[in-house]
Amino acid sequence: MNFFLHINKKFFLLLSLIIIIIFTSFIFTKKYANNNIKQNKINAVLSNADISEPKFAIRNETKKIYLSAKEGNFLSKNEILLKDNVKFKSNDFSIETDNVIFDRTKQTAKSKTKSIFKSKNTTISSDGFDIYDKGNKIIFYGKSLIVLK
C-alpha cells in the first residue's frame, strides 16, 4: 500500500501553505535588510556640502592660481567655504590647508587653519594666510616657520 494515500489531504495542504509562507517571509526580510544596508551606505557617502570637489581660479594679468577642494559650502552669494584638502596651485607655488573662505568677486582667499606654502626654494608653515590683490600678495598669520634652501 502507498504511504501518500494515507496522508490527510487537508493536513498536507496546510503544511505546504505554512512552508511557503515561511519561505516567502524569509526572502522578503532578507531583501528588506539588504535595501536598508544599501540606503545606509548611500547616506554615509552623501554629505552636507553644497559643492563636491569645487575648482576655481584666481586670475590677474600675469598668472592664475587654481583652487581645488574636496567640498564647499556657500556662505553668501560670493563667499564659499572650501573644506578638506584645499589646494592652491600656480606655476610658482602651491599652498595646502583644510579650510578656506574664497570670495569669487574680489578674487581673495582667507584661511585660519594650519597651512603649508611650497615653492622652488622656500617652504612656509603658518597658522593661516590671506591672499588678496588678485593673488599678487599673500600674508601669513600666526606662528610661521620659514625654510629657505
Image (tube, rainbow, N blue to C red):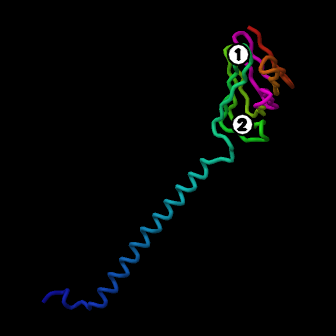
The residue carrying pointer 1 sits among few (fewer than 14), some (14 to 19) or many (20 or more) residues within 10 Å by Cα, namely some
Crowd class of label 2 (few under 14; some 14 to 19; many from 20; radius 10 Å): many
Q: Earlier in the sequence, mark 1 or mark 2?
A: 1
Label 1 element class: loop
Which residue is more in the foreground, 121 or 50? 50
Q: Residue at x 75, y 31 (%)?
A: 104
**Residue underneath mark 1:** 63
Magenta span includes 73 = no
Tell me the quadrant of the picture where the N terminus can be found: bottom left
Query: Residue 41's x, y, as percent?
Result: 56, 52
| Quadrant holding the C terminus | top right
Q: How many numbered badges does the structure rendering display?
A: 2
Q: Which residues are magenta?
A: 104-125
Identity of the residue drawn at 86% across and 24% down:
141
Disc ID at residue 83: 2
Which numbered tag is attached to residue 94?
A: none
Q: Amino acid at mark 2?
A: Lys
Q: Is residue 126 above or below residue 75?
A: above
Residue 27: image location, x then y, percent: 42, 68
Q: Residue at 21% of width from left, 91% of height from top?
A: 6
Amino acid on which disc 1 is placed: Lys
**Residue 64 rendering spot, x and y as whole percentages:** 69, 19
Q: CA distance from mark 1 to mark 2?
A: 24 Å
